[in-house]
Image (cartoon, rainbow, N blue to C red):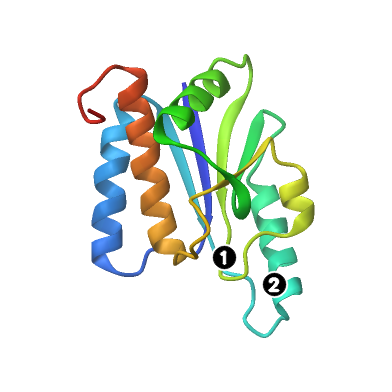
Amino acid sequence: MQIKIICIGKLKKSYWQDAAAAYIRRLDSFFSLTLFELKDGPGHLSPQDRMQAEARSILAKTSAQDMLICLDSAGKPLSSPSLASKLQSWLEEPGRIPCFILGGAYGLAKELTARSTMLLSFGPMTLPHELARIVLLEQLYRATAIMHNHPYHH
């Protein structure tokens, strides 16, 4: 089983890198996880043009197999058990790969979110993209623990 994550921006601080590495190690025992870190759009561009440039970079890393799940503040918040249920159904779709997309500072271009299978939200609060990535990795691990009746999620 495969999962793909495409993120705009790198984790620059060691504490973000360490947290991400810990969850990636945990997930690697259940899935083939591919994570792409893409450059932020050029800073001299307007926010709209920057999101367009980032969308082009993101789409270049996707394939026809990818089922895009975009993290977006306008998306649907899910409980951890609901995410586990969704993840299980996505993983069972033949020939499809769940592909989670995390945008940059200005979010995701509308043409990218329009292509998504689901818009997913971590709630109404705005999170720095580094923290959003850690939350995504932790929630994917938690969903996996739920799917496998692991005690991580009591």
Q: Is residue 68 above or below residue 2?
A: below
First in sequence, mark 1 or 2: give its number: 2
Rendered image quadrant of residue 12: bottom left
* Residue 97 image position (x, y, % from top left): 58, 28
Going by the numbered disc 2, the residue's amino acid type is Arg
| 22 w.r.t. 73: above or below | above
Query: Nearest the camera: 1 or 146?
Result: 146
Task: Report the residue at 42% width, 46% height from top.
Answer: 136
* Local secondary structure at mark 1: loop
Badge 2 element: helix
Q: Point out residue 62 in the picture as x, y percentages from the top left corner.
A: 65, 41
Seen as rendered, the residue at the extreme bottom is: 44
User: Closer to the camera, 122 or 18?
Assistant: 122
- The residue where tag 1 is placed is 104
Image location (x, y in percent) of residue 73:
59, 57
Along the horizontal axis of the image, is 11 left or right of 38? left
Q: Are marks 1 and 2 in contact (CB under 8 Å)?
A: yes
Residue 10 visible to an observer of this rendering: no
